[in-house]
Image: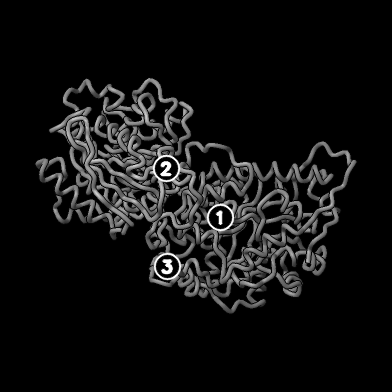
């Protein structure tokens, strides 16, 4: 298990201050220390339009509620949130930061419940309090401004356990629930927890912590078999509300949380599992310490928004994003399979924090060229042929002299571990399984040697660096690693000005690096400042802005690999690239991320093909979103296309599995498109007529 650097730093800081584990303190000391630690790790306190305290009748006297209501009138969707603390610690105050952020981010009303604590009030007192509060809120919806048809429960740790127990009770006794949010829940108290021992993690949450809390909560050990104490042991989990289960790799409760998600899934409950590698129990409540905490809160907000039927929103957490990455957990189960690549975009938006989504989705300046790419492709009409006797389609083609399963490559894209822990290895593996080339970026977050080791055909994309000796070293590594081609990107003398990244002060987290560059070369990419894109600062310091044709000739002489020139829009440049020895050119405006106002790539494709003739292959990049788009490019004369953002969407949504599914879907779409156009293979598409290219 790899410990996240933030976790290591936090453990070290606690050890340095001599902070004793909570289970070594008196109850009063532990309760005070728990609240202090959470407040210190929560970060800035978010304002909410209205926060008020209420008292309601409970099973054994009054219960305290705290209501967080965002701006807006009328009944609102509402989340009842049960705080964590091992049923022994915690209070309404410890959940304050979580409730504020979720109220703003969904937006929805959040009500946290001051249930009774053990050992003064052992099991099942807390369960009965939380269920009673849930029923009371539903029954007094008008008084509280609650939409009773959009009511959810959630909680972290012991609160996740209570939320799961409440769903079991509500299934028979009501009210009806729209969702359950279970953050590292305790779901099985009948055995020994699997996870860090005291020796592995003496300062935070370990197996001894679990035993200490359990001893306080369960007056009789036999109660551990009760499904209200151990929801995993319930005989029947059917009919429960859709769930998001959050787990942390270094948490003693990780395995039982994942098993509960699997059982919910098997019972037919729409379930998503968000797993955070290298993280510890408690990270969700401490976004001021753990950047994955903000990521997980953003994902929770997006899940609730979906279940409440609210429109998607770019700002998933009402806090200025820091540009840090969060270890994305893949969905255990999506409600419906993706039927188009566009489906992956919405799924990615759901799981990615706003600043990372903007980094992927955004373009330069006013994003005119981003929109132009899509508009221009949509205007290309393909005239199908009929009565051609096509009943079987072979998608196979040859690119740079090598056979591939379809005329598609995965475009070079930087820092893929920013999207999902599978990162470059996941996308390369998916490309290899699909039988297509994978283009590895200079700014890959995984070394090129590891990428080629997965067995895919890898083309290496080169950004020209200021340090020519470093370029030479990198080329030697590329050849030694077995890359099949060298792709030189020529449209990035400087990084295009990207307003979304500037507004977000976008930067990389410490654990995502330019892995192909020497240590320390990417320090600027991790240094955030208001109004500054750390990515842009890094590229400005690293890339050579004055690349010339002579440099391309130098490459041609130095490397005996097929040479591809990417980023060409002017036919004169395509001709010059061929003269310098290019085996292929990629017609590309960098996905609208460089010169805003540049033409859509597809509009220049016919002119460039006419200019170079059969002297090199021509590929199309920028805006490809479907099998129909691939057909359009082939009909215009392209040898193939590069697929960019949709592969990042699929990676974010489901890791390697998502990427494999997306490429399989694209193959189905392309097969359909060729069949409907009367083409038995990609070569036949070049004979089709097109309309609508400016």
- Quadrant for residue 528, please give it: bottom left
Q: Is residue 250 left or right of residue 654?
A: left
Please name which of the two marks, 2 or 1, marks the residue nearer to the observer: 2
Give the quarter of the figure containing the N terminus.
top left
C-alpha distance separating marks 2 and 3: 26 Å
At label 3, counting other C-alpha atoms closer than 10 Å, the crowd grade (few under 14, some 14-19, many 20 or more) is many
580 vs 159, nearest the viewer = 159
Q: Residue at x 47, y 49 (%)?
A: 351
Q: Mark 2 — residue?
A: 274
**Position in image of residue 246 (x %, y %):** 38, 41
The residues tagged by marks 1 and 3 sit, at their Cα atoms, a distance apart of 35 Å
How packed mark 2 is, by other alpha carbons closer than 10 Å (few <14, some 14-19, many 20 or more), is: many
Say the numbered circle drawn on residue 505.
Answer: 3
Q: Which residue is mark 1?
A: 481
Q: Toward the viewer: 694 or 92?
A: 92
- For the point 36% across and 40% down, the residue is 141
Q: Secondary structure at mark 1?
A: helix
């Amino acid at each position: 298990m790899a410990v996240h650097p933030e976790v290591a730093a936090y453990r070290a800081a606690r050890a340095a201050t001599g902070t004793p584990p909570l289970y070594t303190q008196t109850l009063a000391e532990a309760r005070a220390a728990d609240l202090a630690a959470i407040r210190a790790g929560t970060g800035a306190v978010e304002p909410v339009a209205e926060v008020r305290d209420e008292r309601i009748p409970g099973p054994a006297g009054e219960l305290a509620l705290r209501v967080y209501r965002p701006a807006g009138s009328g009944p609102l969707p509402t989340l009842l949130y049960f705080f964590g603390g091992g049923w022994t610690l915690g209070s309404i105050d410890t959940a304050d930061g979580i409730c504020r952020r979720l109220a703003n981010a969904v937006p929805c009303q959040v009500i946290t419940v001051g249930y009774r604590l053990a050992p003064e009030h052992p099991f099942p007192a807390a369960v009965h309090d939380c269920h009673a509060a849930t029923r009371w809120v539903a029954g007094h919806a008008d008084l509280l401004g609650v939409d009773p048809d959009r009511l959810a429960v959630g909680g972290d740790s012991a609160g996740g356990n209570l939320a799961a127990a409440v769903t079991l009770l509500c299934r028979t006794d009501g009210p009806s629930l729209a969702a359950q949010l279970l953050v590292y829940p305790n779901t099985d108290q009948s055995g020994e927890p699997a996870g860090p021992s005291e020796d592995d993690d003496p300062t935070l949450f370990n197996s001894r912590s679990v035993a200490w809390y359990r001893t306080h909560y369960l007056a009789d050990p036999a109660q551990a078999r009760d499904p209200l104490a151990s929801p995993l042991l319930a005989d029947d989990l059917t009919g429960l509300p859709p769930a998001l289960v959050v787990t942390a790799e270094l948490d003693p409760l990780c395995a039982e949380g994942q098993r509960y998600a699997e059982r919910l899934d098997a019972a037919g409950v729409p379930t998503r599992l968000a797993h955070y590698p290298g993280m510890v129990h408690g990270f969700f409540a401490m976004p001021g310490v753990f950047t994955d905490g903000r990521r997980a809160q953003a994902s929770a907000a997006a899940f609730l928004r979906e279940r409440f039927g609210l429109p998607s929103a770019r700002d998933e957490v009402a806090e200025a994003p820091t540009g840090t990455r969060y270890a994305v957990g893949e969905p255990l189960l999506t409600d419906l399979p993706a039927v188009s690549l566009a489906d992956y975009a919405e799924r990615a938006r759901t799981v990615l924090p706003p600043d990372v989504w903007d980094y992927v989705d955004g373009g330069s300046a006013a994003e005119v060229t981003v929109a132009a790419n899509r508009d221009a492709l949509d205007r290309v009409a393909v005239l199908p042929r009929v009565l051609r006797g096509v009943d079987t389609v072979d998608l196979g083609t040859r690119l740079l002299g090598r056979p591939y399963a379809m005329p598609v490559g995965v475009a070079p894209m930087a820092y893929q571990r920013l999207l999902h822990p599978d990162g470059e290895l996941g996308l390369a593996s998916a490309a290899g399984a699909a039988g297509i080339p994978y283009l590895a970026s200079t700014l890959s977050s995984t070394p090129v040697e590891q990428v080629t080791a997965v067995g895919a055909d890898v083309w290496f994309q080169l950004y020209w660096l200021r340090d020519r000796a470093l370029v030479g070293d990198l080329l030697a590594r590329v050849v030694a690693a077995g890359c099949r081609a060298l792709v030189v990107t020529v449209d990035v003398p400087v990084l295009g000005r990207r307003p979304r990244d500037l507004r977000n002060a976008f930067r990389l987290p410490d654990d995502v690096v330019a892995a192909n560059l020497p240590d320390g070369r990417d320090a600027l990419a991790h240094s955030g400042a208001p109004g500054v894109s750390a990515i842009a600062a890094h590229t400005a310091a690293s890339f050579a802005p004055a690349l010339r044709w002579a440099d391309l000739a130098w490459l041609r002489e130095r490397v005996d690999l097929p040479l591809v020139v990417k980023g060409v829009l002017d036919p004169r440049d395509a001709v010059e690239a061929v003269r310098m020895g290019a085996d292929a050119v990629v017609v590309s405006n960098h996905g609208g991320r460089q010169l805003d106002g540049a033409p859509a790539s597809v509009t220049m494709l016919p002119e460039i093909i006419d200019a170079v003739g059969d002297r090199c292959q021509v590929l199309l990049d920028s805006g490809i979103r479907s099998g129909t788009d691939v057909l359009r490019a082939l009909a215009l004369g392209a040898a193939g296309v590069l697929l960019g953002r949709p592969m990042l969407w699929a990676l974010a949504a489901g890791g390697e599995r998502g990427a494999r599914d997306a490429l399989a879907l694209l193959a189905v779409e392309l097969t359909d498109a060729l069949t409907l156009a009367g083409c038995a293979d990609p070569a036949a598409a070049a004979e089709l007529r097109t309309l609508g290219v400016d």
